[in-house]
């Protein structure tokens, strides 16, 4: 009962975080970018990079909350699944550049992981199926060495 209540509260807070004027503005900027925008275009307009950073930090925390099972993948899919996938399509090249600049693979790793989970989740939920709890849930494989049964992020490099 407590776990369910905590998850419901997390979903409400998550929805609220997407409704702030600052986040809404940043998200509109990110969605206006071309898919796979590169670092040069982002650096040319600091407001674009600031918006991408705000969206990144917010979505990164969503990925961590799903991994730790604070919020369910169902709730994320229903509240913002398409938005998360659209944002990642826009900023993934920029994020990979950020990783290289920072000398590691940590930047936006949880967004990438979350997108992998959402894509797997949506693959089992074709149009025409019932929403929410009525939909069959896809199997999510356990990761070795992690507390959650959801797999940890795998960083995919573009070639």
Image: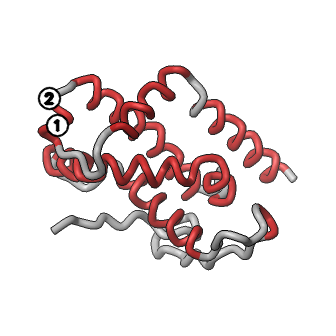
Q: Position of residue 64 (x, y in %)?
A: 51, 51
117 sits left or right of 40 in the view: right
92 sits left or right of 68 in the view: left
Q: Position of residue 74 (x, y in %)?
A: 68, 59
Within 10 Å of disc 2 (Cα), the crowding (few <14, some 14-19, many 20+) is few
Q: How many marks?
A: 2
Q: Position of residue 124 (x, y in %)?
A: 62, 76
> Which residue is at 81% across, 46% downward?
5
Helix, strand or loop status at disc 1: helix
Mark 2 — residue? Answer: 44
Residue 22, above or below 55: above
Residue that protrudes farthest toward the front in the picture: 128
> Which residue is at 69% across, 42% downward?
10
> Which residue is at 80% across, 52% downward?
4
Closer-to-camera residue (122/13): 122
Closer-to-camera residue (129/22): 129
Check residue 135 in the rendering and tell me which mark sits there, or answer none: none
Check residue 41 in the rendering and tell me which mark sits there, or answer none: 1
Contact? badges 1 and 2 (CB < 8 Å): yes
Give me the C-alpha separation between circle 1 and circle 2.
5 Å
Q: Position of residue 81 (x, y in %)?
A: 56, 54
> Which residue is at 87% across, 53% downward?
1
């Amino acid at each position: 009962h407590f776990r369910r209540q905590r998850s419901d509260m997390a979903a409400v807070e998550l929805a609220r975080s997407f409704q702030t004027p600052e986040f809404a503005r940043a998200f509109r900027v990110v969605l206006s970018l071309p898919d796979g925008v590169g670092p040069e275009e982002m650096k040319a307009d600091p407001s674009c990079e600031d918006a991408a950073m705000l969206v990144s930090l917010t979505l990164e925390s969503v990925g961590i909350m799903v991994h730790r099972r604070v919020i369910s993948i169902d709730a994320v899919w229903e509240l913002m699944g398409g938005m998360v996938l659209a944002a990642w399509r826009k900023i993934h090249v920029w994020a990979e550049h950020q990783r290289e600049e920072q000398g590691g693979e940590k930047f936006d790793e949880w967004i990438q992981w979350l997108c992998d989970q959402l894509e797997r989740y949506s693959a089992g939920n074709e149009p025409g199926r019932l929403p929410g709890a009525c939909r069959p849930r896809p199997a999510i494989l356990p990761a070795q060495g992690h507390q959650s049964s959801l797999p940890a992020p795998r960083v995919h490099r573009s070639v």
